[in-house]
Image (spheres, helix red, strand yellow):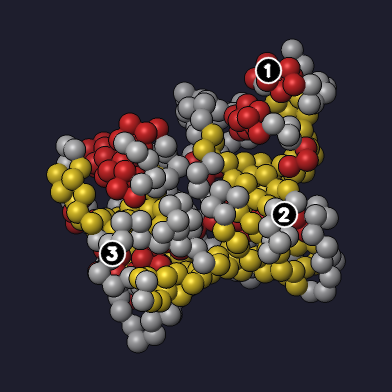
Amino acid sequence: MKQIKLPAVFMRGGTSNAVVFKQKDLPQDRALWDQIFLAAIGSPDPNGRQLDGMGGGVSSLSKVCVVGPPTRPDADIDYTFAQVQVKEATVDYGANCGNMSSAMGPFAVDEGLVKVSGREALVRIHNTNTRKIIHALFSLDDGLAAVDGDLAIPGVAGTGAPVKLEFRDPGGATTGKLLPTGNAVDVLDVPGVGNVRASLVDAANATVWVHARDLGLTGTELPEALEANAAVMQKLSAIRIAGSVAMGITANAEAAAKNKSVPFIGFVSSPQDAKLLSGETIKADEIDLTGRVISNGQPHRALPLTVSLCMAVASRIEGSVVNEVLRKGPDAEAPIRIGMPSGILTVASTVRQTDSGWHAEQGAFYRTQRRMFEGQVLVRASRVPGVIAAGTRKVA
């Protein structure tokens, strides 16, 4: 059987890669999108390599983004993120990707979806997954998004032009509340594990935060060591499921186990010397806290940006697990330096305690991005029978 051709761009945003589509090039019936995305990325793949698609075998390289006209007056574009599972025929829309968010403004400018002039562009992005607004500010080069620059980010070789991302009012992206339970710390009754202290925080993406020592860990473990520790991975999964139910994201443990996109789960520890994936060592005095994150059942090599923003927000909430391990400084709004497997990530956040509780005003960080391939992505017609039946695309 022949294949279907769809216009697409392959982009890097921060430490992630994704196939990016314009909404107008996809079927109007969004129920057909999953077939296309799975086929394009190469999932499901029981071997975990996605060799028959554009994916890279890990969650950070198994992503799709869709950009279309804005549905809000305070935005220039709509952006929908799809997390494609590697080994399962599942596409999740329950969370945003901060890394790929950095590529959406440049994509919109380069595609002519947003008209700009001068030396800099500001693109207001409406992320449909979280219903939040993100401002992307970046330099232009002959009317296109600049790619050359001096910014180096952990996990990406070389340097690039900076993209500043400002997440406006990031609290409640998943649940509608910054603290879904109303508490800075909860004690979760986790089946098979026992009572676990956790901070359930929802900023940019909902995340369950626990202390490394409560898992029997130092907090500096690298991804391969975590993946090899089946007992710890099972414990983290059980805590995540309990956190999901407590946050009201899912009604029960069965539903939480199926919803792998949110909440994320992370564990934190105080600043300490730690080996990096590169073999180098970061020193305790170079960071303000140490963090590790699991998403879609995989330890991250470089932390997801939305979850890093959540970590920064949580670090400002007095009494939270993250705040407990934070190196305190005189400036309550100074950017937080997070030690992670790929290096140091700096995230800024503004958090206030009001009469109605804690409120996250904004979070910001810098990323680089690059358009790497543009043209058409081909998917087997046999993989998208619904699209063929709908007659929305011609077979090449």
- The residue singled out by tag 1 in the image is 385
In the rendered structure, find residue 70 and report the number of the disc placed on it.
2
In this view, the residue farthest toward the left is: 194
Give the SS element for disc 2.
Answer: loop
Residue lying furthest front in this view? 356
| Left or right of residue 148: residue 227 | left
Residue 300 vertical position relative to residue 86 in the rendered view, above or below: below
With 330 as the anchor, is 377 left or right in this view? right
Q: Amino acid at mark 1?
A: Pro
Quarter in which the C terminus is drawn? top right
Image position, residue 202 (x, y; %): 41, 57
Q: Amino acid at mark 3?
A: Ala
Does label 1 or label 3 sit earlier along the sequence?
A: 3
Q: Nearer the viewer, residue 163 or 358?
A: 358
The residue indicated by pointer 3 is: 184
Comes first in the chain, label 3 or label 2: 2
